[in-house]
Amino acid sequence: MKTNGSKLVEKRTVDMQIIGDWVEPNTRVLDLGCGAGALLDYLVQTKHVSAAGVDLELVKITSCVRRGLSAYQGDMTTFMRAFPDKHFDRVICSRTVQELADPRGVILEALRVGRALTVGFVNHAFWKNRVNMLLRGRKIRNEVYTTEWFESRPANPVAIADFEHFCAVEGIQIARRVHLAGNWRTPCRTMPNLFAGYALYDLAR
Amino acid sequence: MTDDIEVEPATQTSPRHLAPGDVGLVTPRDFVYSQPFTFKSGQVIPGFTLRYETYGTLSATRDNVVLICHALSGDHHCAGWHSPDDRKPGWWNNLIGPGKAVDTGRFFVVCANVLGGCQGSTGPSSTNPETGRPYGVMFPFVTIRDMVRSQKLLLDHLGVVELQAVIGGSMGGMLALLFGIEYPRFVRRVVAMATTARESAQAIAFNEVGRQAIMQDPAWNHGDYPRDSGPRVGLAIARMMAHITYVSDASMDRKFGRRKKNSAHADAYTFEPQFEVEGYLRYQGQSFINRFDANSYLYITRALDQFDLAHAYGSLEGAFSHVEADTLVVGFTSDWLFPPEQNRALTLALLRAGKRASYAELATDLGHDSFLLESDELYTLIRGFLERDQPYVFDYSI
């Protein structure tokens, strides 16, 4: 995801604030796909959490280490298997689910090692995406989906309706949900699968 | 640890020891501890000497100290040059120096030869005051913990109040971890590279072959041999075999492949070295016997084999339960002696114990000795870990 462009940076801020609101102070938090550690850094500074992150890339781990964060380079499922049940107070999976090879496996494992799980994702069924696909008939491209198909990583785009169906099938409790409109700021209460651009879920089992 | 780091040849105009980023000429010193020292085994020696070097300047508050811990065959000379004519600088010269990843403009760097070693510190080749002859196998059995305790006495002697970091690879990583465990309030950061909480059966097996090569050499004579001789054949074979475990199939293939020595094509039907790799290993063996004591090799490999954090403290989490330091563990993909998996296990146990710990992995094909790699990625990682004291300026971007 590109980070230059103030609009997207602003969107990231909203995302982080909501995720932060769901984090209890002084708890143990795990961020799956922590990247350079900006979210964990924010949570350490605002909530004084004990933070750990997992990412695949050495440059991301290096950045986390420079911020003073605990970060583990490797596969997130293998990482979680090394921990006892409910070791973390909250696991966060922000804008990562759509990139996972086995989203179901990761979410269920996260609900085992965490007392709560935050999942945030871009709603692929957002109406502009539908129009974009309908009119152009090509891979959706906009400020969120920035790359051509041939330069994109394999992805599992997910829609709000898909995600809630998954939770129902797996018996996952949805403690809280936040749907944001296309600007990722205003709450979206009507037909979120069509009108929400971004969705956040607070899950437990 | 290998000793074949390539160094640019010296030129008349710019001596290597005066290069920017180099600590320059250094002189080893001796710390003499003249009180009885009790080993973990219960055996006692009346005192000991540790040979050590320091680089940089100790701050007035005596808290800007970085301790470097060496591997099995390493020593206290980890940076700089003993003389402008030296063929090679200290073994970690690429990492340590003014402006380097371990910045001697900022840190006071200390490195000591381990207890049980043979590069100036007390070990089996030292004179037993009771007999006036070398200790040989009368020397007490040494453990990694004995090495750590003796180095803590050196740091106390230097007046060090806090370690900013203790850094080591391979056996040095074991010392670094144990420093964090044994002296939790003294150690702020631990960097453990290419290391393990306990050796696998395979690593113990390799050490045992090395020991057998030494002990089956008649010149070993149950450890009783004069200083200038001893089981040279056995020690050379031990080193040749061990050297293979420090590199990798890919790196050996790149360096030697099946290339033949120039002299080899005359007669293929002899057992003289024909392949370059054979000549190289013989050279490694021969250069090792001129600088290493066979009994030290037995003692230190035994210490490596016996190191087992989980066993010593009940569990790995138990071992780390009192650690206060931030720990950075670094693994290398091609390390098959202490493979990434064993390095990951250290980090995971630290995190399970609720400690601050990170795991980073470098993709290399140089095997176990990759921790000595000249790699900007590694330097950035180490520097970032050591120098991140000031709070990060907050930035929302990812």
Image (cartoon, rainbow, N blue to C red):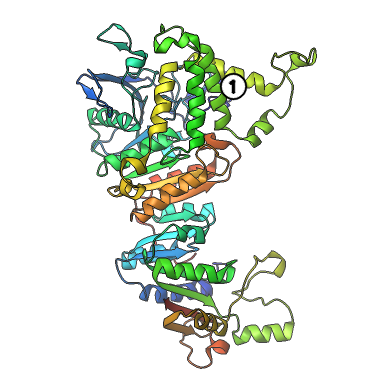
| Residue drawn at the location 48% of the way across and 51% of the way down | A62
Tell me the quarter of the picture where residue B74 sits: top left
Number of numbered labels in the structure image: 1
* Vertical placement of residue B26 versus B21, above or below: above
Q: Given the image, what chain letter belongs to the residue carrying mark 1? A: B
Residue B137 screen position, x and y as percent: 36, 16
Observer able to see residue B11: no
**Front-most of residues A142 and B248:** B248
* Vertical placement of residue B37 versus B194, above or below: above
Left or right of B93, for residue B126: left
Residue situated furthest left in the rendering: B35
Residue situated furthest right in the rendering: B266
| Residue drawn at the location 48% of the way across and 12% of the way down | B231
| Residue drawn at the location 43% of the way across and 72% of the way down | A117
Left or right of B274, for residue B157: left
Residue B384 screen position, x and y as percent: 43, 48
Q: Please state, as top left, top right, bottom left or bottom right, where the C terminus of chain A lies in the image.
A: bottom left
- Mark 1, residues whose alpha carbon is within 10 Å: few (<14), some, or many (≥20)? few
Residue designated by label 1:
B9
| Residue drawn at the location 27% of the way across and 48% of the way down | B322
* Vertical placement of residue B98 versus A45, above or below: above
Looking at the rendered structure, the kind of residue marked 1 is Pro
Residue A137 screen position, x and y as percent: 74, 82
- Where disc 1 sits, the SS reads loop
